[in-house]
Amino acid sequence: MRERILDRVRKLLAKAERTDNDHERATFMAAASALMAKYGIDTLPPVGTRQTPGDRIVTLPGPWAREKARLVSLVAQAVRCRPLLIGRGDGGQRVHVFGFAADLERADLLATSLLLQMASGLARVRVPEDVTAVRAYRRSWLLGFTDEVYRLLCEAESRAEAESAGAGTELVLADRRAEVARAVSAHYPHIRMSVPRTSGSGYRDGVAAGRRADLGRTGMPAATARELSR
């Protein structure tokens, strides 16, 4: 079942990648993201089954390392993982992600794809002529892209949960959230929240690009695209 669903997702994404029609791409994207969310529900264990959350540390190289790390963090959060930005190390910004195996798998697949899409989107950005702070505009574009992708992913997850419509599902999800929270607290008893700054037009343009993102495209190369690596 797992491989069949993932195979269907890959085929939908391949179609989305090949088409130049925005409407078709959006249709394939919606179907693929819905299947990914359904996969997250279908892999839940029965009520009362005990599982242990896992964790992994992801390192995002600079520049734009903090913006990449934020994308990874919000994608992970959208699919029921708990991410923490833990600062610089190993040549980049590090994100420590906690979650159960199937959700960590989904977070990895989506984040890998969306990092590539964010890079290619930034490559196509034409900064308005009246913008003098070009780097600030580009940074706000990245933040807007990330926030919109996060919103779309959360919507897909919420629909999948609502369609399951079972008290058992709600209990399992609540239990898993508590387990993940305990795992995070064991590693990090003191957590500080931060909010990035944005500038209006770049952020709005990034949001618009995020709406057009293919939420499950695969095939992240060894290095991110040039616009995210300089």
Image (tube, grey):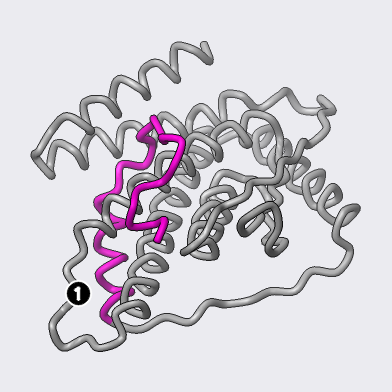
Q: Quadrant of the C terminus?
A: bottom left
What residue sits 81% from the left and 25% below the top? 49
Residue nearest the observer in this picture, 46 or 19: 19
| Horizontal and vertical percent position of residue 211 | 28, 55
Residue 150 appears in which quarter of the rendering?
bottom left
In the image: residue 68, left or right of residue 140: right
Residue at 47% from the left image edge and 40% from the top image edge: 112
Residue corresponding to mark 1: 127
Judging depth in this view, the residue of 56 and 159 nearest the camera is: 56
Disc 1 element:
loop
Left or right for 116, reference 127:
right
Tell me the kind of residue under disc 1: Val
Residue 159 to residue 127: above or below = above
Asked whether 222 falls inside the magenta stretch, the response is: yes
The percent position of residue 64, horizontal first and vertical second, equals 47, 64
Q: Which range is magenta?
A: 201-230
- 13, above or below 186, in the image: above
Which residue appears at 39% of the width and 52% of the height?
Answer: 152
